[in-house]
Amino acid sequence: MFSQPVFLQGLGMGASLIMPIGAQNAHVIRTGVAGRHVVLTVATCILIDVALIALGMSGFGALIERSPALLLAARWGGAAFLLWYGVRCLSSCWRGAAAPGAANGGQAAATASRALGIVLAMSLLNPHVYLDTVVLLGAVGSSLAAGHRASFAAGAMTASLLWFSVLGLGARRCAFVLARPAVWRAVEAFTGATMLVLAVLLLNS
């Protein structure tokens, strides 16, 4: 049975976990400004969140808590990826590279798979994604009465849908300002610095 208060609880908790700036959010902003595969990136982030929330609600979070090797592998893999991505963005900033325009034809088809690979790595090679989305949301949702769990999950999933849509498409709408050379360099510098800081924090966590 649908419960509006429980739905809003899930919406609020989901929003509080995904809205703070992090690797995934910074990448979505950068993609939106660049204007390349924005819908693909946003849709992938939403689908991953929905899948992880569903896993958490099914009790998968307890399995993750008992698998330190999985979290360790994700930590090192995620840190390595964030370091690479951060250096890449800072290098682009240093060179003064302009914001990439939209690709087309065969080039678009080739870069779509690369864009998908980057957003998958950005989303999944981060142990905090599993701890927050699967373990924490799953624990709260599983503690509710069985009839209310679907409402809680729907609220958390709606938060992801709204947030990533607003973030990516909003950045795309503002691209005429954000894609200016000086502003784009600032975006690249911010993204690169964010990735490097998160990589260090990930290794120290």
Image: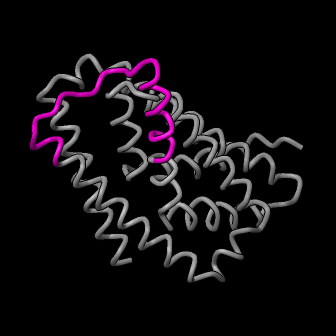
Q: Please determine whether, in this image, residue 185 is positioned above or below residue 86.
A: above
Residue in the picture at 58% in, 47% down:
12
Q: Quadrant of residue 181?
A: top left
Which range is magenta? 91-117
User: Residue 112's spot in the image, x, y percent?
Assistant: 49, 33
Image quadrant containing the C terminus: bottom left
Question: Going by the image, does 40 lie left or right of 197?
Answer: right
Q: Please determine whether, in this image, residue 117 is positioned above or below residue 30.
A: below
User: Residue 27's spot in the image, x, y percent?
Assistant: 38, 43
Q: Quadrant of residue 59?
A: bottom right
User: Residue 71's spot in the image, x, y percent?
Assistant: 53, 75
Image quadrant containing the N terminus: top right
Magenta run includes residue 62: no
Question: Going by the image, does 185 lie left or right of 17?
Answer: left
Residue furthest front as drawn: 106
User: Residue 183's spot in the image, x, y percent?
Assistant: 16, 30
Count of numbered labels shown in the rendering = 0
Q: Quadrant of residue 82?
A: bottom left
Residue in the picture at 29% in, 58% down:
84
Residue in the picture at 58% in, 35% down:
43
Magenta run includes residue 107: yes
Q: Please determine whether, in this image, residue 21 is positioned above or below residue 200.
A: above
Main SS type for the magenta part? Answer: helix
